[in-house]
């Protein structure tokens, strides 16, 4: 098979032993987290000319994690803060303003921001009762602050995972008994249950593009209870994207405007181990490890995002060390 991608090692911040990449924008800027030694981690921004930049923490914090970035270079994530113990607060970071604390929903103590769009809207989750263990999805805007998106009926918790430039939000909501369903939230209709693959009981929506196509995973009646990467189309149909050859479970983490999907799947000849994949309508699911130069030293474990140019980010091992990677076609 032809080698289609050049791979860049995102390396680590000074003193670090490992890194992970979680978000990419259409300018090819990448965000994630890197260890810095002493049991601490830092949110980072990677750019082609500048490499890794440490984004710091909220005041008094020890560690921070970056989860998403928009086309304007605004970064979102979560950080520990002064005297927080085990609690984190969602943040938005900008080049001009640094890291801004987004707080929590009323009565909450902890929050995390996962995604942001070109309008600077932010989604994530916040607890609503530190003693009850229930989290709600939120949508944050600069004028209005943090809005509680609620849950699906009969649910007590929800998590928002992504949004697009039309302010459509996706995530999943707990249904009890360890089950949860993917949702799509819109301003006009609120939170809608996206359901599962046929015969399934649990699903989660993880990413959405500007065409309203959603990816994540779901179990099904034919998967033996295993989660399978799936695609919800704009028409509301759900499609099982399968697994790598010999695999039994998979999850999709990213989708671009061309409906190219990336994620992670187990594979044959190795029990419980994962490889990163890219899926397209014409070629189905391909192992990204077969699409980089031979003897590169890399094992690509999971792909977390893909931009409009087809650049893919994720996490793998390079010569035995866990590092974030960037693939460019």
Image (cartoon, rainbow, N blue to C red):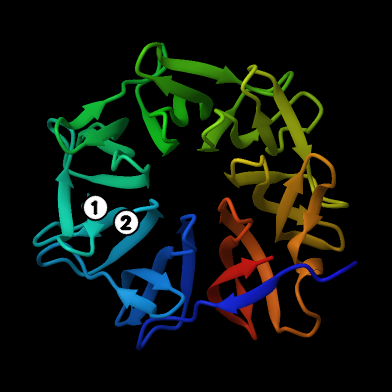
Relative horizontal placement of residue 280, taking residue 205 as reference (left or right): right
Relative horizontal placement of residue 13, taking residue 56 as reference (left or right): right
**Residue 86 in which image quadrant:** bottom left
Q: Nearer the viewer, residue 147 or 196?
A: 147
Query: Is there a contact, CB below 8 Å, between mark 1 and mark 2?
Result: yes
Relative horizontal placement of residue 131, taking residue 50 as reference (left or right): left
Relative to 210, residue 27 above or below: below
Assign the N terminus to one quadrant of the image.
bottom right
- For image coordinates 43% across by 27% down, the residue present is 168
Q: Which residue is mark 2?
A: 75
* Location of residue 106 in the rendering, given as x and y in whole percent from the top left corner: 13, 30
SS at mark 1?
A: strand
Residue closest to the far right: 1
Q: Residues within 10 Å of mark 2 (few under 14, many from 20)?
A: many
**Residue 327 in which image quadrant:** bottom right
Mark sitting earlier along the chain (1/2):
2
Relative horizontal placement of residue 176, taking residue 248 as reference (left or right): left
* Location of residue 56 in the rendering, given as x and y in whole percent from the top left corner: 22, 70
* Location of residue 157 in the rendering, given as x and y in whole percent from the top left corner: 36, 27
């Amino acid at each position: 098979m032809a080698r289609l991608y050049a791979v860049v090692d995102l390396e680590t911040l000074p003193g670090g032993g490992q890194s992970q990449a979680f978000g990419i924008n259409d300018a090819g800027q990448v965000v994630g987290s890197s260890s810095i030694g002493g049991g601490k981690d830092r949110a980072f921004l990677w750019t082609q000319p500048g490499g890794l930049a440490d984004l710091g923490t909220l005041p008094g914090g020890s560690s921070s994690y970056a989860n998403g970035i928009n086309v304007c270079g605004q970064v979102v994530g979560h950080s520990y803060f002064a005297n927080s113990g085990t609690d984190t607060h969602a943040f938005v970071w900008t080049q001009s303003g640094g890291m801004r604390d987004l707080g929590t929903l009323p009565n909450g103590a902890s929050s995390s921001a996962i995604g942001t769009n070109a309008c600077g809207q932010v989604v994530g989750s916040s607890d609503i009762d530190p003693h009850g263990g229930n989290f709600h999805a939120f949508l944050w805007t600069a004028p209005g602050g943090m809005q509680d998106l609620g849950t699906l009926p009969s649910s007590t918790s929800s998590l928002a995972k992504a949004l697009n430039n039309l302010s459509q939000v996706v995530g999943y909501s707990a249904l009890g008994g360890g089950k949860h369903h993917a949702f799509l939230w819109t301003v006009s209709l609120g939170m809608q249950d996206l359901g599962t693959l046929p015969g399934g009981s649990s699903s989660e929506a993880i990413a959405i593009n500007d065409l309203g196509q959603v990816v994540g995973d779901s179990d099904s009646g034919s998967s033996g209870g295993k989660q399978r990467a799936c695609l919800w189309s704009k028409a509301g149909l759900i499609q099982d994207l399968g697994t790598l050859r010999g695999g039994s479970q998979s999850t999709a983490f990213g989708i671009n405007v061309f409906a190219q999907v990336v994620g992670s799947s187990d594979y044959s000849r190795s029990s419980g181990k994962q490889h990163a994949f890219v899926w397209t309508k014409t070629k189905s699911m391909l192992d990204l490890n077969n699409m980089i130069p031979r003897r590169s030293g890399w094992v690509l474990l999971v792909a977390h995002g893909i931009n409009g140019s087809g650049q893919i980010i994720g996490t793998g091992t390079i010569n035995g060390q866990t590092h974030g990677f960037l693939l460019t076609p």
